[in-house]
Amino acid sequence: MTTHHPRPTVVLVYQRISLPWVFESAERAGIDLVLIPRPDEAVSEDRLPPAVVDVLRLDIEADRAAALNVLRRRYEQNTFQGIVTLYDPAVPFVAEAAELLGLPGIGRDVALGAQDKRVMRARLAAAGLNVPGFVRLDDPADWEKAASLAFPVVVKPAHGFSSLGVTKAESPHSLKSVVDQVWQTCASKLGQVDGLVVEEYLDGPEFAVESLAHGGDVRMLTIGYKGDPQGPHFEEGVYRAPAALSETVQDDICREVKAAHRALGITDGPTHTELRLRGGVTPYLLEIGARIGGSGVSQYIASGVTGIDFAAQALRIAAGIATEPLGSGTLPAPVAAAANYIVPCNGSGRIIAIHGLDELRADPRVDHVVQMLFPGDIVRPYPDFTGYPAFVLSRHANIAEAEEFHQFLDQAIRIDYGHEEQA
Ligand SMILES: Nc1ncnc2c1ncn2[C@@H]1O[C@H](COP(=O)(O)OP(=O)(O)O)[C@@H](O)[C@H]1O
Ligand SMILES: [Mg+2]
């Protein structure tokens, strides 16, 4: 007689099905998904990714306690082994749900430490990590508390994501107006603001690190180059990995990232860390997310560079079935380069046409063109961010070829705009 082993099931919170990588990893790993779609997303049952076995409609932001109750009932009636999200604002909810149901996770307090930039900065500083001078503002009227920082500074929401509202202030003279403006942007875009962080501007190129933690072991998979955005707003742009860095700098980055996991208590699951090399040499964290980054783009990058199925490992950790050891802390040898290019808006108004994307879909270097904006959609200028037009995900022999490809994309993609009123 054979024993029946049900397939492990993981609840996936607020993932858009247009961003396919985590669904594909689940399918490869033999893990079933219960999808909780974003409340604003219409998902038709006949177009679900194969890994999705059930759809649960739940608004986790409107009524947290009610959402936790629904999950508990679902768990009792039809059990599942884990719960995850790639959506940053949902990380604390997911951690709390896992805690409540006795599933693997980092716990709500650790999740808040990674999600709330005020708490994160305080915990990193207390652990002696590289942290820029910073001040928390619980009220915009307190802006003068930040005037004694070394300028320029960056003003950002405590619970922000996607660079929303993040704005540079060049001098104390503009601080009040920048604080007011960021507060207003966040109030209108995030619905609520419960505080800001003002911190010294970190001058130097930006990098992202994809890591997996399990049982307190942290393994860095890849370090990628994220450009050198100067502000005043920080629209996301390129991501190319593996970054061309000396071994010394790579080691410094890995040491800082590992220490950050320890300082914040992130012992299990995937993480996405962003940092700048201050003065071109010293790693300073911008933030660390206790999730797979970029709605799954990090899965594309990390698996493309290392050959390791990052998201599948993350799902196994979430389901409590990870058996393979993570290996040592050193970066695995890259097998290729992988890149993401976020098409810049380069203007505003009503989109008339986006040129160049169709040709790219046939380009052998390109795996995915994920288009988010279409003719007829309206793009408003920063800080009123209305979304990115498209992602172009590609693979290359090395990072130099990825960079060359991105320079080509700068010329090859063009958006025509008309006035907003034009139909
Ligand atoms: N202290 C800083 N110095 C320099 N650039 C910063 C600083 N803080 C944020 N930025 C820029 O703004 C972007 C978004 O900030 P981040 O803290 O990552 O917030 P979000 O959660 O919105 O991504 C960063 O990727 C970086 O380019
Ligand atoms: Mg960020």
Image (cartoon, grey):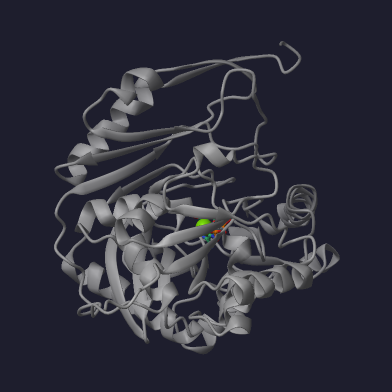
For image coordinates 49% across by 70% down, the residue present is: 290
Residue ranking furthest to the right:
141
Inspect this view and state whether residue 205 appears: no
Q: Which residue lies furthest to the front in this view?
A: 1
- Residue that appears at 46% across and 67% down: 9
**Residue 63, image quadrant:** bottom right
User: Could you tell me which quadrant the N terminus lies in?
Assistant: bottom left
Assign the C terminus to one quadrant of the image.
top right
Which of the pair 211/240 is nearer the observer? 211
Choose between 151 and 112: the one closer to the eye.
112
Q: Position of residue 134 (x, y in %)?
A: 61, 72
Residue 302, percent across and down? 29, 57
Q: Nearer the viewer, residue 267 or 261?
A: 267
Q: Where, by quadrant of the figure, is residue 141 drawn?
A: bottom right
Q: In this view, does 131 lie above or below 416?
A: below
Taking 276 as reference, is 322 above or below it? below
Quarter-wise, where is residue 130 in the image? bottom left
Which is nearer the eye, 421 or 411? Answer: 421
Could you tell me which residue is drawn at 81 percent across and 63 percent down? 140
- Residue 33 picture location, percent across and down: 48, 59
Question: How many marks are shown on the rendered structure?
Answer: 0
Horizontal and vertical percent position of residue 384: 70, 39
Residue 175 showing in the rendered view? yes
At 51% from the left and 44% from the top, the residue drawn is 17
